[in-house]
Amino acid sequence: MPEIIKEFSQVEYLTVFNAILFGYVGAEYYQGWGNMIRSRKNLIIYWQHILWTILMFTLFIQNWYGIWPRIEYINLSVFYFLFSLAPIFIFHIISVILFPDFTNPDNYDIEKYYFENVKYVYLLFGAYLVLAILNSIVYPDIGNVLLQTLIRVFGLVLCLLAFIFRKVNSVHIIFLVVGYLAVLVFLFALPHSST
């Protein structure tokens, strides 16, 4: 297969598809928040739900930032390319679950909707963390990989515990607090430009 066709490399070609998918998933979050704002007179907003949507969107953005060093590998085989799409797919499913169908008036109680569906978010987020750990093995990674992996393993354990004890309201609060702290630590574990 040629490296470049009319000044367009295969990596650039494949990256365009990834970027389109990232844009689509990002639009799901913006559409969900937009629908919540549009339906605000009918909604019973729940603070944990809002914090979850922000946390998942922040992790989604971090995922986009973190794939930069891996992009050069996606044209080595179709498996690398497909593997690069898996986290995007998980974040899409999470976004679909996080935001209810606002055309259904039964979904206007966000607290009720949240507690009916958070178990799926815990499982999907755990699946994302497994993929993130595998990504660090499959692709050469940057930054403090050991710290990143430890945070991911800790997050995976936290997801499993939160799933098991999801009936205990304080577990959700603890998960959010620890989740936000872990994201902050993780963001600082990523390499930063010195310029």
Image: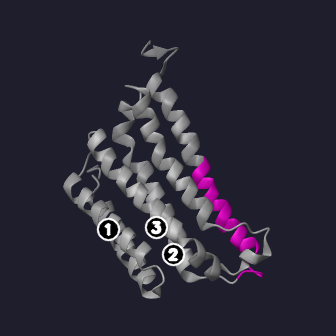
Residue 69 rendering spot, x and y as whole percentages: 33, 40
Identified by mark 1, the residue type is: Val
Element marked by disc 1: helix
How many C-alpha atoms fall within 10 Å of the one at disc 2: few (<14), some, or many (≥20)? some
Disc 1 target residue: 157
Residue 40 within the magenta-colored segment of the rendering: yes
Identify the main secondary structure in magenta: helix
Identified by mark 3, the residue type is: Tyr
In 3D space, how far apart are the residues under numbered discs 2 and 3 (Cα atoms)? 14 Å
Answer with mark 2 or mark 1, whichever residue precedes in sequence. Answer: 2
User: Can you tell which quarter of the image residue 72 is in?
Assistant: top left
In 3D space, how far apart are the residues under numbered discs 1 and 3 (Cα atoms)? 11 Å
Q: Quadrant of the N terminus?
A: top left
Mark 2 or 3, which is nearer the eye?
3
Disc 2 target residue: 51
Residue 92 within the magenta-colored segment of the rendering: no
Q: Is residue 189 left or right of residue 177?
A: left
Q: Is residue 171 left or right of residue 119?
A: left
Residue 86 vertical position relative to residue 124 in the rendered view, above or below = above
Q: Is residue 122 left or right of residue 147?
A: right
Answer with mark 1 or mark 3, whichever residue precedes in sequence. Answer: 3
- In this view, the residue in front, 161 or 54, is 161
Identified by mark 2, the residue type is: Leu
Disc 3 target residue: 122
Residue 5 rendering spot, x and y as whole percentages: 50, 14
Tally of numbered tags:
3
How many C-alpha atoms fall within 10 Å of the one at disc 1: few (<14), some, or many (≥20)? some
Magenta residues, start to end: 24-43
In 3D space, how far apart are the residues under numbered discs 2 and 1 (Cα atoms)? 20 Å
Query: In this orientation, does residue 129 appear?
Result: yes
**Is the residue under label 3 in contact with that under label 1 (CB below 8 Å)?**
no
